[in-house]
Amino acid sequence: MKIAPSPSFDLTPFELPAGQRPVFYGLPPEVRFCVRCNMSNQQPMSTNEYRHTGNSRKTTMQFDADGVCDACRFNDLKRDGEIDWDERERELLDLCDQHRKNDGSYDCIVGGSGGKDSAMQSHLLKYKYGMHPLTVTWSPHLYTDIGWKNFQNWLHVGGFDNFLYTPNGKIHRLLTREATINLLHPFQPFILGQKTFVAKMAAKLNIPLIFYGEMPGEYGEKVSHKESGYSDRVEGTEGEGFSLDYQGETDLRDMLLGGRPIGEYLDQGVQLADLMSYVPITPQELSQKHIFWKYLGYYVKWVPQEAYYYAVENTGFEANPLRTEGTYSKYNSLDDKVDGFFYYTRWIKFGVGRAMMDSAQEVRNQHITREEGIALIDRYEGEYPARYESEFLDYVGMTRDEFFALCDRFRSPHLWMVEDGAWRLRHRPGLNEPIVREG
């Protein structure tokens, strides 16, 4: 689908010579792609969402001197003998032995939606390692049929207790609209809730051990493969793996939700009680309750495709009968009708879409070649998520023209150009980078 610039949009910055074009979000001015997996160096790392503004500078995927990204290097460690997986499993058994309870109470928490990763994670802990996990879920914006079915199968076929939390629908819609307008980030309210809800439930129910799935290094975050988890964090650091996004010294009124201070919402009549679901737990409470996180991917070799097969076999997980727009896969991130717009808006801002992310992961796990990854990117990257367009636009209160005009404001001139009257990325993998064959 070719998309033309909005009629009144100023294209002057996009017509400047190379080296003079504005670069948004602190992205690297020179666009590069990993010589192994095709991932772009524009790929942003995690950040504190409570400080996220439209002008926030991003930390991005790092490449080494050979042009290989951190995510590829991290995945190398899973295969090259650096990690003793038998020893890691013994560590997991010791951890479980320390926390396993025999009085019927929960001994750990797993957050998730019933997708392949949370399904495998909870099932392994319960049925292989003898734990009694409580599963907790922060509801998607708008459940898809297949997402709801997989969530139900997780509990009824897999056999788990679950707390499903659905935030105030009017407020969630308001925050999603604000996050879309101010950040072009319609998924932010879900991310805020998902991050903080698990910790709040752990504190409320006095269950100190939280399990997450894959390690952040899988996606290029700066975290050592020797770090089994997360228990405390120095505030103010960014891009170092998992982050709970603390409030820190920021006054509550100045904390940002959807790129706006909480104080502005209160001044327009929103009740503080309706926003507290999005406010993070304090590090003091985490410390008092002795709450800590462990990555199951530290102990068990994490391969996304194998997680899919495991979930199909053990929890009734089903792939979507329809290909996910913007990519070629049918089993990743199926739960939310807003999901496609999350990936589409990332592509607008950073030139990194869903096909690049999915294929890069499969190249790293040696399921496809780099050449196949490039072909998939060429075919599917940036595909407009039309399937749920009407529900999404209704949810955020926009017309299609308004949404496209908003997207134009977030396009960085160093990434985008206009060709034959339509937007086109200036760079793509395969044109500028040599292909390096492994082995």
Image (tube, grey):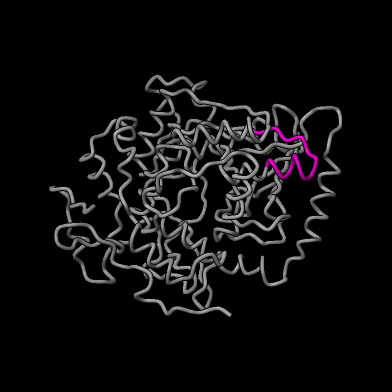
| Residue 259 in sight here | no
Q: Residue at x 79, y 51 (%)?
A: 92
Res. 91 in view: yes
Count the labels in the image: 0
Residue 240 position within the rendered picture, expressed as x and y whole percent measured from the top left: 59, 56
Residue 151: image x %, image y %?
Answer: 56, 34
Q: Is residue 363 left or right of residue 216?
A: left
The front one of 40 and 53 is 40
Q: Quadrant of residue 297?
A: bottom right
| Quadrant location, the C terminus | bottom right
Q: Is residue 82 above or below residue 250?
A: below
Residue 388 location in percent, x, y?
Answer: 34, 37
Q: Nearer the viewer, residue 155 or 53?
A: 155
Check if residue 425 falls in the magenta segment. no
Q: Quadrant of residue 401?
A: top left
| Residue 133 is inside the magenta segment | yes
Residue at coordinates 50% horizontally, 66% vertically from top-left?
Answer: 368
Judge whether 431 appears above or below 265 on screen.
below
Q: Which residues are magenta?
A: 122-135
- Where residue 260 appears, x then y in whole percent? 40, 36
